Amino acid sequence: MDGILIKQLYRQAQEFLNKKIIINGWIRTIRTSKNFGFIELNDGTHFKNIQVVFDELIDNYPEVAKLNVGSALSVAGELVESPGEKQPFELKAENIKIVGISHPEYPLQKKRHSFEYLRSIAHLRPRTNTFSAVFRVRSILAYAVHRFFQENGFTYVHTPIITGSDAEGAGEMFRVTTLDFDNAPSNEQGKIDFSKDFFGKETNLTVSGQLEGEAYCMAFNRIYTFGPTFRAENSNTARHAAEFWMIEPEIAFSDLQDDMELAEEMIKYLIGYVLENAQEEMDFFNSFIDKSLIGRLKNVRDSAFERVTYTEAIELLNDADEQFTYPVKWGNDLQTEHERYLTEKIFKKPVFVTDYPKEIKAFYMRLNEDNKTVAAMDLLVPGVGEIIGGSQREEREELLQKRITEMGLSVDEYWWYLDLRKYGGTKHAGFGLGFERLIMYVTGMANIRDVIPFPRTVNNAEF
RNA sequence: UCCUCGAUAGCUCAAUGGUAGAGCAUGCGGCUGUUAACCGCAGGGUUGUAGGUUCGAGUCCUACUCGGGGAGCCA
């Protein structure tokens, strides 16, 4: 591929100034007059465009002047300093090759579109400023996640996408089957006979890689997963998707305090990495999405997260001068309005809430000395709510068995999970970070559908 | 699933129960440094769907469809 990338141009402008270069890209806007015109060309490698100036020196001026937004071009010319104020340099075209025209009905106009409309053209929306920035940040963040863990001695584990057990009961699951719905085999009870199915048993898409992650944690000490996760919940909110990506680290020889330290260090690293490596994009979000974004993120990066126990949180909420729709009572789970009040009004920054009543948490969480609470933690952040959920895991085999039974689950199903406690089990802990929620928090985007390229939600799997 | 708000030109939005408009986009023309360029002209509508009230419905009523926001569930 001939040509240089716009990202290179902006990073090493001096090297190219007053030299002949070729840029390949797409027209973002075009303005023409009788004998000359301007094109803002974007090549996708950088948030900013390059301004192309063209006149009758090129041999196809009339054709170029009539081009529509979206057309693909290959422009050869000299990079010169720009007399205009909005760009440091521009490309003086000597030859413009029309690579692919864009038809007049191109659905993206120069003015702003609503996010709702852009969702209906998800195949074209990455060409807009906002989505160009969102998905570049998503890529940079994914890289930062790997860097953080790889540099800290973690091993990346690919846990299965198709799972054979209804592991944690973390939510409704999508069934995976090759059975013919119109002619499914049935057993003696008249139910569908899954022993005839592809895997010889009922299988689903994973809702969490945690249990398998724990197995590798007991071999590699520090592991993380980073992959797609599926929930078939009929939830219709700006924070839920049926298919999303989750990051789940698991650390051996570690307790809940270590778990929170890891979570805090990771969030701070990721924020710092994005501020450092996506400056143009972050400036854009700060200008057009949320004017307090960068200030808030810097504050989060540079100050300690709060830590309160569930019991303390209940007291704080009871003392608060605020009428809640749902009652604040020890034993009840915190409602969204309670979580928001804690992180947005009381602390105004990220806060870990720890040690929840065992009745409202999962079976694998470690029982505390008081026999009433478990070593769990949720990290709440302003604007998004719960971004991380984690816990120290129950490493005592008898207690774990007891909890499985109490929760109405089958001990037999978890034989291999219990084995991990039998053969050199250690105290260990981990958490799950919703990748999209992290992106929302970092970019200020308010809807999870706008941080996933082709979002899957209830009633929506277009594209 | 529940509550609530909405659906008018390709897009973003106006229109007291009384002849459906604007900006942008598109087409044509003008313009020698533009910056969501500017100026002129033109085309573009079964007002989400189906009923109802009314002399008359974009506007009022009912149902449905789709979407936004909030809640539950969670990451």
Image (cartoon, coloured by chain):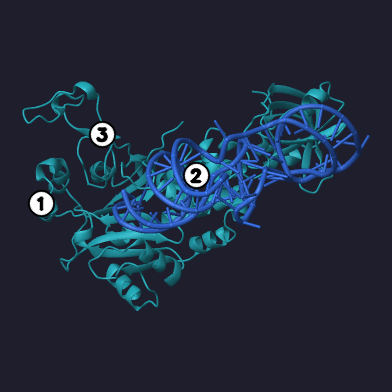
Chain colours: A cyan, B blue
In the depicted structure, whether residue A388 falls above or below residue A65: below
Cα distance in 3D space between marks 2 and 1: 41 Å
Q: Which mark is residue A450?
A: 2
Q: Earlier in the sequence, mark 3 or mark 2?
A: 3
Please tell me how crowded label 2 is: few (under 14), some (14-19), or many (20+) other residues with Cα within 10 Å. many
Mark 3 or mark 1, which is nearer the start of the sequence? 3
Whether residue A451 is visible to the viewer of this picture, yes or no, is: no
Q: Which amino acid, mark 2?
A: Asp
- Residue B73 location, x and y as percent? 29, 53
Against A96, residue A355 (above or below) is below
Q: Does label 2 or label 1 sit earlier along the sequence?
A: 1
Q: Nearer the viewer, mark 1 or mark 3?
A: 3
**Residue of label 1:** A405
Q: Secondary structure at mark 1?
A: helix
Q: Amino acid at mark 1?
A: Thr
Give A219 or A276, whichever is nearer the viewer: A276
Between marks 2 and 1 in the image, the one whose residue lies nearer the viewer: 2
- Label 3 marks a residue whose chain is A
Q: Quadrant of residue A198?
A: top left
On the picture, is A137 further left or further right than A359?
A: right
Q: Residue at x 35, y 47 (%)?
A: A235
- Residue placed at 69% from the left, 41% from the top? A10
Drawn side of residue A452 relative to residue A295, left or right: left
Q: Is residue A435 above or below residue A392?
A: above
Q: Chain of mark 1?
A: A
- The residue tagged 3 is A175
Q: Are marks 1 and 3 in contact (CB under 8 Å)?
A: no
Q: On residue A15, which mark appears? A: none
Residue B61: horizontal and vertical position, in percent?
Answer: 44, 52
Q: CA distance from mark 1 to mark 3?
A: 25 Å
